[in-house]
Image (tube, rainbow, N blue to C red):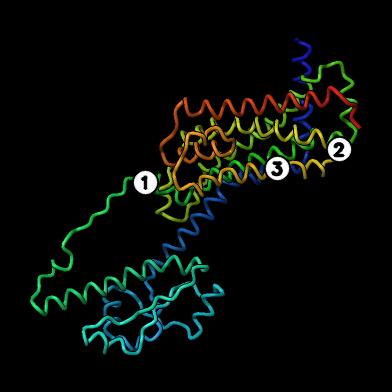
Amino acid sequence: MKKQLDAVGTVLRKELTDALRDRRTLLAVLVSSVLMGPLILVAISGLVASLESRAEQREVYVSGMANAPTLRNFLERQTYTVKEAPADYEAQLRKSRFSDPVVVVQPDFESTLARGESPVVEIVSDSANQRSEASTGRIERLLGGFGRERAVLNLALRGVAVQLLEPIEVEERDLASTQTRATRITGMLPYFVMMAVLYGALNAALDTTAGERERGSLEPLLMNPAQRWAIVVGKWGAVASVSMLIAVLSSFSFLPGQWVLQSDTLAAMFRYGLREALLFLVVLLPFAAALSALLMAVAIRCKTFKEAQASATIVLLATSLLPLINVFNLGGEAPWHLWVPALAQNTLMTRVLKGEGFGVAEIVIPLFVCAVLAAGGVWFVARMLRHAALK
């Protein structure tokens, strides 16, 4: 038994040395883990900061503002700057060259308002233009305020109590915590972390199986007296180590990544510390081990590295598509989610970002599934190496 364990250690050291010499692996470790956290947070905070800056500018683009001096007076009293919309604003909105919705005022606005009727005001935007669509709600609330002010003035002139306009008072109470609200923006982070772990294991897993088979270096290795399972465990340990290293670096990269947040709002809402990073690792490390074994099992049946890349597509698709169930499932989490690889990890990491965490009972199921997948993958690779000669 000691000889077999020594063989495992020898193969493990050899594979780790080869992996660290591979520039593709080193590039994957650097880009997908060390830089991922800061880059993603910079992109998200940049988007939030741009939306906040646009809201702070308090600008309204209007077409036909000369037809509504009353509306202009209201907008300026709300400290908004009224700007004339471009003549071809519709074409610019469709082509995303213009990023603000346009208020269109009809020529008979003032005369209709003087008769006590309701003039028509259009808010023109393009739902495919996300930047203009994001400001539509703000313009709707602004025009709604103008309508309420006019209604209150009309009632006051007729001696009618203003309270008749709003017979009830509606107050909103949001049960979501600050961290939960932040996940509407940062909820994509677990997905990117899992993709980094996946692609980190991909090159190492394919190179240590199909790559060595293509280069002809696998046959001399199999001529050693060590048992097949010892060789396979050593190879799997090396691939899993690379994948786990990426998981560790990715999880901890969000800690310094918070230093580069450009949005004060996002910085106040995003709570990610040492506890969250460690909980991420509890979820990711078994997942990295299972992915490594699965990719090796897929690649061992291939004769070339390119063929293995094509065959691994099914693992890539499954890992990237399964977490999307949470996006399209409006009913919330279901117990069976914890039994589905990738989906379970995405669910648990999202809970961590929400500040909810998870208990031992909830991590046991994904851990069991990952252990079964890892054991099955290692067994399959050993079985393939034990039988037919490799050519």
For the residue marked with disc 1, what is the amino acid?
Thr
Gap between marks 1 and 3 measured at Cα: 38 Å
Packing grade of label 3 (10 A; few <14, some 14-19, many >=20) is: few
Residue 326 numbered mark, or none? none
Quick check: 84 above or below 49? below
Quarter holding the N terminus is top right
Q: Nearer the viewer, mark 2 or mark 3?
A: 3
The residue carrying mark 1 is 178
In this rendering, would 48 be left or right of 301?
left
Which quadrant holds residue 110?
Answer: bottom left
Q: Secondary structure at mark 2?
A: loop
Which residue sits at x=50%, y=32%?
A: 279
For the residue marked with disc 3, what is the amino acid?
Ile
Between 254 and 361, the residue placed more toward the observer is 361
In this rendering, would 82 be left or right of 314?
left
Packing grade of label 2 (10 A; few <14, some 14-19, many >=20) is: some
Between 159 and 176, the residue placed more toward the observer is 159
The residue carrying mark 2 is 303
The residue carrying mark 3 is 314
Q: Nearer the viewer, mark 2 or mark 1?
A: 2
Q: Secondary structure at mark 1?
A: helix
